[in-house]
Image (tube, rainbow, N blue to C red):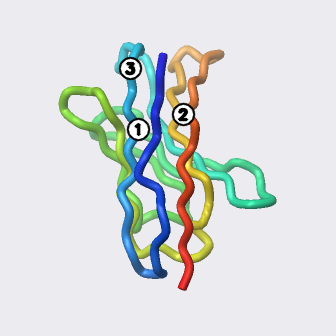
Amino acid sequence: VQLQASGGGYVHPGGSLRLSCAVSGITWNLYVMKWYRQAPGKEREFVAAMITARNTNYADFVKGRFTISRDSAKTAVYLQMNSLEPEDTAVYYCNAHFRGGGRDYWGQGTLVTVSS
């Protein structure tokens, strides 16, 4: 199983970024795809989940600003981030969570910096 996150970078407040996570080695319908983030000095926190293609879930602090999606070929999951705020500065991680529990796979993280 491999998860490869990319797309992070530096952006001004109010800007947008699109994170990508290339996924291989899993059976997609057995996993929930998620994004987490970890800000400096803080614990890792949940950002968004794709339970199914039409059933998504978001942390309250990103609702209306971030959108999780996947490509039709089921090779990647994305996180479109709009209206970014300095508080969104963090390393963002993609995660594949086995629906039966007890198995999680993580990407290496991609750094997002929001600053004026």
- Rendered-image quadrant of the C terminus: bottom right
Q: Calculate the distance from the C-alpha at mark 3 to the C-alpha at mark 2.
A: 11 Å
Whole-number angstrom distance, CA of label 1 to CA of label 2: 8 Å
Locate residue 99, reporting x and y percent: 51, 20
Instruction: Tell me whether circle 1 and circle 2 mark residues in contact (CB < 8 Å).
Output: yes
Splitting the image into 4 quarters, where does residue 52 fall?
top left
Residue at image location 46% in from the left, 40% down from the top: 5
Of the residues under marks 1 and 2, which one precedes in the sequence? 1
Q: Judge by depth and name the residue closer to the eye, 19 or 103.
A: 19
N-term mark: 3 or 2: 3
Mark identifier at residue 73: none
Helix, strand or loop under label 2: loop
Amino acid under label 3? Ser
Number of marks present in the image shown: 3
Give the residue displayed 49% in from the left and 69% down from the top: 10
Position of residue 62 measured from the top left corner of the image (x, y, whole percent): 49, 64
What residue does disc 3 label?
Answer: 24
To which residue does mark 1 refer?
21
